[in-house]
Amino acid sequence: MTAVTTALHRALAADPDLLVLDEEVAEALHEGRPVVALESSAIPQGPAFPANLDLALDIDAAVRASGSVPARIALLGGKILVGMDKDRLEQFATDTSIPKVSTRGVGLTLAGGGAGGTTVSSSLLAADLAGIPVFAVAGIGGVHRDAPQSFDISADLVQFTRSRTAVVCAGAKSMLHPAWTLEWLETAGIPVIGYRCDDFPAYLSVSTGVRNPHRIDDLREIAAVAATHWQVGNETSLLVTHPISEADGIPTADIEAALADATALAEAAGVSGPAITPYLLKAIAEATEGRTSAANRAVLLSTATLAGEFAVQMSLELA
Ligand code: PSU
Ligand code: MN
């Protein structure tokens, strides 16, 4: 396991109960068994209840089936939850008013005592505090396509420069600019390693058409790279990418067609900032009539499975 960080000391000195570790997660961490951190922002914003609850439970099951313990992160009642049982998941799945909270909102939400669904960025902050070195998400945030005008670059990327976490993903979300996202990651010193794939994946599609900077076909080797990345003093993340399966993937042309319409609608409606990602995801889902929700489910499960396997290798490497 990663060493206890200074941030953890500070956070726990201020409030020893700030992190509420689910029993299963606490035991696993204590015994050095593999754990996979997960985000919660997609639960209230994702498919409607009860599909979102079923999906979250299935993701947890996929992580367990590959030998790791799921630790879903969320904010509630002034605490950071690390691991959510079925009742907690149901609470988040049935309350669509729970806001998406990125890094900058963590202190605000905790101090206010309300609930927050953590994005990739805020989940990584919490994973670091809890000492969980592996995180899984289907599509990371990144550089938006209108970034030259809007300056819209996800806080996920910035948090990668602060959290020592291996992020297992199926690339960046479809509406982003993959090449600019990779450029940003290179500038920030974040390794991006394709696991058994040449191309940087596109979340719901197999490829963005842009190549991963590196490819390694053995999870144990990737775990060794991550450990070395941290050993030499990097306090940053490392990305492991693996695409949705060919069978489940949606052709890029279909996603692009849906995106073109959705982007025009978003512009006309003046949607921007943190609202744009959920807005476009929803619009793509509606335009592709359920094909997207099947693909979304498939890629969430395949990524969770891979992250579970990778966390096993990571725990051996860091033991
Ligand atoms: N899935 C959703 N809605 C979201 C996200 C995922 O249905 O808002 C989150 C992810 O947690 C990701 C974040 O970290 O969107 C990126 O959003 P932004 O581009 O605003 O940084
Ligand atoms: Mn943004």
Image (cartoon, helix red, strand yellow):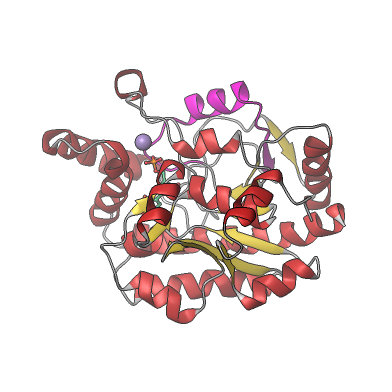
Q: Is residue 93 above or below residue 209?
A: below
Q: Over which residues does the magenta segment extend?
A: 172-194
Q: Is residue 27 visible?
A: yes
Residue found at x 66% / y 29% = 213
Q: Is residue 139 visible?
A: no
**Nearer to the camera, 183 or 270:** 270
Residue found at x 68% / y 43% = 164
Residue furthest out toward the top: 148
Query: The C terminus appears in which quarter of the rendering?
Result: bottom right
Q: Is residue 191 above or below residue 148?
A: below
Res 18 quadrant in image: bottom right
Rendering coords of residue 154 (x, y %): 43, 36
Residue found at x 31% / y 61% = 98
**Nearer to the camera, 177 or 295:** 177
Q: Is residue 183 left or right of residue 94?
A: right
Res 49 quadrant in image: bottom left
Rendering coords of residue 97 (x, y %): 26, 62
Rendering coords of residue 117 (x, y %): 40, 58
**Nearer to the camera, 278 or 122:** 122
Q: Is residue 126 above or below residue 178?
A: below
Q: Is residue 39 above or below residue 221?
A: below
Residue 289 covered by magenta stretch: no
